[in-house]
Image (cartoon, rainbow, N blue to C red):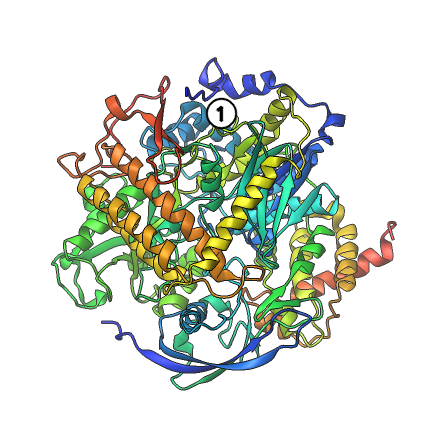
Amino acid sequence: MQLDAHIPAGPLTEKWDRHRFELKLVNPANKRKFNIIVVGTGLAGASASASLAELGYYVKTFCIQDSPRRAHSIAAQGGINAAKNYTNEGDSIWRLFYDTVKGGDFRAREANVYRLAQLSNNIIDQCTAQGVPFARDYGGLLANRSFGGAQVARTFYARGQTGQQLLLGAYSALMRQVGAGMVTLFPRREMMDLVVANGQARGIIVRNLISGELESYAADAVVLCTGGYGNVYYLSTNAESSNVGAGFRAYRKGAMFANPCFTQIHPTCIPHTGEHQSKLTLMSESLRNDGRVWVPHHPGDIREPQDIPEKDRDYYLEEKYPSFGNLVPRDVASRAAKAQCDAGKGVGLTRCAVYLDFADAIERDGKETITKKYGNLFDMYELITDDSPYQKPMMIYPASHYTMGGLWVDYNLMSTIPGLFVLGEANFSDHGANRLGASALMQGLADGYFIIPYTIGGYFAETTLPAVNTDHNAFKEAYQLSTDGIAKLMSINGKRTADNFARQLGRIMWDYCGMSRNEQGLNKALTLIQDLRAEFWENVWVPGIDKDYNKSLEKAGRLADSLEFAEIMIHDALNRSESCGGHFREESQTEEGEAKRDDDNYSHVSVWEYDGIDKKPKLHKESLVFENVELSQRSYK
Amino acid sequence: MKKLPQTINLTLNVWRQKRDEKKGHFETVAARNISVHMSFIEMLDSVNEQLTLEGKDPIAFDNDCREGICGTCGAVVDGRAHGPQKATTLCQLHMRQFSDGDTIVVEPFRARAFKVVKDLVVDRSSLDKIMAAGGYISANTGGAPDGNAIPIAQEIAEKAMDAAACIGCGACVAACPSASAMLFVSGKVSQLALLPQGRPEATRRALNMVKTMDACGFGNCSNHRECENACPKELSIVNIARLNREYLKASFFSVET
């Protein structure tokens, strides 16, 4: 199969305008004839639902939480990028585009990224109009700060709660459409399957998480906004219900999966304390603007940080990367922290942590200024660890945070299944092999507010959609498959809980497909996962009944998907024997130990197609063509 | 060096209820070997793991982000919504706040407008209904002016942000003797009334949100201030004063009612 990204012709700067002109329109009066299903209510899902409903489409919106306001976009702290150049530092759409392509280690599509940079400015305008309380200067204008890996201050923020405020803005817009009767809301629903009829995505099967009943819904198109798969690592900064299920089930129905091995391990998370740990909490990357990262010079130095004099401290990021210092991109910072801990220089209880020290910043700017910038983050840190960052350096360690890989989509954000659109973190489109800080919020909202409203219209205008309702055979089959899947899980009556299995899978993925990967380890992981999966299907224990609120059943179902999906990640990591961005193959590094790309052989998107149960997926490639940026080795020295 | 991890043993007196129409009861459950570094939610995880392996029904509770921002979790612990620590959600309440041998009473958020779904899980969809009635600025995607077109004084923006910090958990409702949602409603009304963008709809917003709050079965504010005390984001009742002002102004001058 030939993958066609449908990238419009013409110069980069004109592609999106030209495409919008060329997309066929749906007459306003005809829009009400179309029904759209949106799954997920994070930034992408909420903004898409609201914008589509504003246009006059009838939207059914589903979320796994009890309210759409709770989707995990809410946890994003630091900010959202835009190329406004309000700070007069010479920022531009082109510079944001260039930084994003480079930050992604040249594994993203130029055209998509350029469009993202263009739309970044509209997002800030839209959110401000909705009443998002962005930080402001004394003159009342919007404030900016610089954020991980950027040399200009282009990040807009609302204290340390930017994701929350942007999501509440999108949620408000969504609830307005609920009030207007244009959106029907289905909370506490988990997508069990995608329904494909006549080769087109026409609906979904969901499980009602309160009654346990399965429900079928039909529509003219399905928009997945279901986030990433970071929870495959078990310990991650993701929320408990974040899962790969919807994407994986779409994959099994024919939607291809792109770059699954591109995962982001975020450098600044609170280290884990023991086996009971259920999640890791992110400390915003903005902290690296003022905090200095260090470890003791000598391995095994167990003195308290305040007892370690300057000469015995190793500010390894500042030393190794003089021009970016503590602000190197996430992948670089994470690997550097791992290297220090592997060398025995880690600190804290588990020796798996490095210091992030604010003493100098507090001395320079005063406590008040630091409190204003990071007060809520410091409070959060103290709540969790019982230590105050005002008095003692924070301890941080990398954790799984974001996944750049996702369902493959073309320039219209449509997957390989006609009528199935994928937005936000759930798709693969814009971040290449590494996402820059403050870019996830930007992408989710660009997709939802400003791209899907146009491209879905183009699809409707050019597509014949035969009448399909939930009586169609495709619905009955998908319904039956979901019913059987649940019955199977309930019937095993083994001895281990799903959480217990999930922890073990997470450990395998963290050890062999985490910050550093090699062929031998990946092959080992493959065997370990297959063994674990076999044991899961014989030995998992799901208490209670299926027709009830049953968290254990939910977890078991999601884990079953993760156990399959983890294997695709490993296949992809094995196949890509170069290092790039967050994907570090030990076999491919420079003399200084930095990631070394292999542009001759890997300048492509790896796209995996489902080929049946227990079969290795088929690999397709979408070549990446760079006409506007020159490929260079990333250097942050 | 940090203190070595310690574990404590606790007794939970926890509310069990199959669904809203069934009668609930308290059940005594032992929580053993609980690390003081666990959050309250992780403690419940650990108890549930034990119950599950013993063949018993695990305790149903809602949670999601586990970092105090999504507003999904919540229970009344020893008579206080989200437990004894101020400005803290249940998922951020750590077990070091408790002592070995403690008995802890755990109940759902109780209110007429919050039906019990199961055990500690309640239905808070009425809060979404209130939002749908006016908790927004009608700004369709696409027509927004430049972000800097309307300067907003920093103090005003900060006040709006204070009001916007609400996570919609419903602790204020559970803590209020009249099960009022005034603090919740006032957060949104204040945020949007403070900002110039929100003024055009201020009248309609205040009237419709309060009307819907009443229709959902929430009580009225009776100035007990329990809400602000329980709020994990420390929303101030100043917001309620602002809501009252907006509502009164709207009632007197509105041409729409």
Front one among A407 and A14: A407
What element does badge 1 sit on? loop
A290 to the left or right of A429:
left
Query: Residue pushed farthest bottom?
Result: B101
On screen, residue A174 versus residue A328, left or right, reads right
A559 in relation to B149, above or below: below
Number of residue marks: 1
Number of residues whose C-alpha sits closer than 10 Å to that of mark 1, classed few (under 14), some (14–19) or many (20 or more): many
Observer-nearest of A502 and A52: A502
The amino acid sitting under disc 1 is: Tyr
- Residue B241 vs A242, above or below: the answer is below
Is any atom of residue A325 visible in this view?
no
Percent x, y of residue A51: 64, 36
Residue A633, image quadrant: top left
Query: In the image, A2: left or right of B148?
Result: left
Viewer-side residue, A330 vs A297: A330
Residue A79, horizontal then vertical, whole percent: 46, 45
Q: Position of residue A43 (x, y in %)?
A: 54, 43
Q: In the figure, residue A96 lies in which quadrant?
A: top left
Image height of B236 relative to A81, above or below: below
Residue at the top extreme, as displayed: A10
Is A148 or A10 nearer to us in this picture?
A10
The residue lying at 67 percent from left, 67 percent from top is: B114
Residue located beneath label 1 in the image: A411
The N terminus of chain B is located in which quarter?
A: bottom left
- Chain ID of residue with mark 1: A
Which residue is drawn at the image coordinates 40% and 70% (left, top)?
A: B53
Residue B199 visible to an observer of this rendering: yes
The residue lying at 20 percent from left, 45 percent from top is A521
Residue B245: x and y in percent read 76, 61
